[in-house]
Image: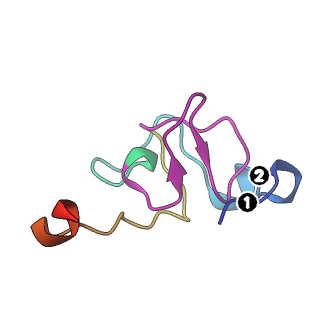
Amino acid sequence: MERDEEDKLNHKAVGYEHPSDHSDDRCGRCAHFVGSIPPRCEAVKSPILAEDWCKRFSPKKSMSLVEVMK
């Protein structure tokens, strides 16, 4: 669940990297990433870019074909 912006963690607290040094672990692939316009995070203050990274990274759960077909 997304927090209010004032309740989110700042970039320094989560080791936010722009640009990211993590080749595959990026915000756009994180379970906390909200891919809207503008992109944002459920837990970290904006701005957030899909190609960046932070210590809160948690890979999105892969969906099985059965889940996709529902």
Query: Left or right: where does residue 63 sit relative to residue 38?
Result: left
Q: Secondary structure at mark 1?
A: helix
Q: Is residue 23 magenta?
A: no
- The residue lying toward the viewer, choosing from 38 and 23, is 38
Q: Residue 39's spot in the image, x, y percent?
A: 56, 35
Q: Which residues are magenta?
A: 29-51
Q: Amino acid at mark 2?
A: Asn
Q: Is residue 63 above or below residue 36?
A: below
Location of mark 1 (residue): 13
Please tell me which residue is depicted at 36% across the width and 65% down the height of the picture: 59
- The residue lying toward the viewer, choosing from 70 and 33, is 70
Q: Secondary structure at mark 2?
A: loop
Location of mark 2 (residue): 10
Q: Is residue 38 magenta?
A: yes
The numbered dot on residue 54 is none
Please tell me which residue is depicted at 44% across the width and 42% down the height of the picture: 20
